[in-house]
Each structure stands twice: as C-alpha cells, then as structure tokens.
Image: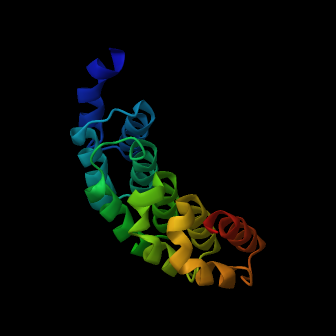
Amino acid sequence: PAASTALPELLRNTRDDTELVRIAAVEALGYLRVDSETVVQEIQDRLAEDPSAKVQVAAARALGQLLPSAASSQGAVAALAAKLEDDQACVRAAAAQALGLIGGPRAAAVVQGLSACLQDEDAHVRKSAATSLGQVGHFAKPVARSLTEGLRDSSSSVRRAAATALSRVW
C-alpha cells in the first residue's frame, strides 16, 4: 500500500542529481523487497552505470537483499559478478557480499569469480569473498582449495572467514 505509492518516486530518485538521494532511494528499494522486474532492473542499472562508487555499493547491497526472493535474477547476478572486477575495492567487496546473500544455485555460477577475489589486494574484498563462498555452501566445493589457501592469508579476518567458509562448503 504505502510502498506502492512511493515506488514511482523512489525509482525516479535513483537518478537524482544528488548522490545521497540516489543512495537513499536505492537503499529504500532494497529494504522494501518489492519483487518487481522494474525495481531489480533499476537497481541493476545503478550498479552498472552510476558514476558514484557509493551508489554502486548501495545498489549491490540492495540486489543482495532483493535477489534471494526475486523471481528473475540472472541478469542481476551477472551484473554483480562483473563488479567483482571493479576498480574500487568497496564495490568489489559489496558485490561479493551480495552474491553471498543470494547464495545457493543462483550464485553457484559465480564461484570462480568469488574464488579469484580471494587473491585480491584488498583484505576486505578477500574476506567478503571467503564469507560469500561459505554462504554459497556446497556449490562452492570446486573452489575449496582456494579457501584452504585463504587459511594462510596475512589478514586474520580473511583466515577466520576462510575457516568458517570451509566448514559450510563441506
């Protein structure tokens, strides 16, 4: 009811000139969890096209909230997977986290991309990737060796995430 009346304005605000308005609108769309192709596509567009890394991070998180229950998500999963190679570490980490929230068979197709993130120069990206592989569960079994290598990471948070992930993969 109230969400449906606000939806058109929220969608419009995702393209506002002000970065903070775009972030708030994208975050709100994620929190509302409206299973709509229009909403998923708009958030996916913000992830792919917005010049602001902060908006892209918000979009990745929103997709992570929406996609576990959304009916159509393959395009959005592919968009998140592409962001695993973004120039900004915060965007790579947010994309990895979102893919973990999606989990299961939908994220199974991107376990190789998540595994590659275990070699990222940024520890937060590596930790996010390890955590997400654990959330994908047994679908991440093909990359268990990479998680095992994560047990020797220079960052204790990555080592901890890798250990937890391995317990969920097997």
Give 21 or 158, whichever is nearer the viewer: 158
| Residue 111, image x, y percentages | 46, 72
x 41%, y 34%: residue: 28
User: In the figure, residue 54 lies in which quadrant?
Assistant: bottom left
Q: Can residue 147 be seen in this snapshot? A: yes
- Vertical order, 26 against 109 (above or below): above
- Say which quarter of the image contains residue 131: bottom right
- Which quadrant of the rendered structure holds the N terminus? top left
Residue ID at (40%, 34%): 33
Q: Is residue 47 above or below residue 129?
A: above
Q: Residue at x 39, y 50 (%)?
A: 59
> Is 22 on the left-hand or right-hand side of 111?
left
Q: Is residue 119 left or right of residue 79?
A: right
Where 111 falls versus 121 (above or below)? above
In the rendered image, the vertical position of residue 77 relative to residue 31, given as above or below: below
Query: Image check: 60 left or right of 143?
Result: left
Q: How is the image coloured?
A: rainbow
Q: Quadrant of residue 56?
A: bottom left
Q: Position of residue 57 (x, y in %)?
A: 45, 55
Is residue 53 visible in the rendered image? The answer is no
Residue 120 in the figure: left or right of residue 99: right
Query: Is residue 131 or residue 165 the one in the foreground?
Result: 165
Tell me how many marks there are: 0
**Image quadrant containing the C terminus:** bottom right
Question: Which residue in the rendered view is the most extreme toward the right?
Answer: 156
| Outermost top residue | 1
Residue 34 image point, x, y percent? 34, 32
User: Could you tell me residue 16's position as x and y percent?
Assistant: 28, 41
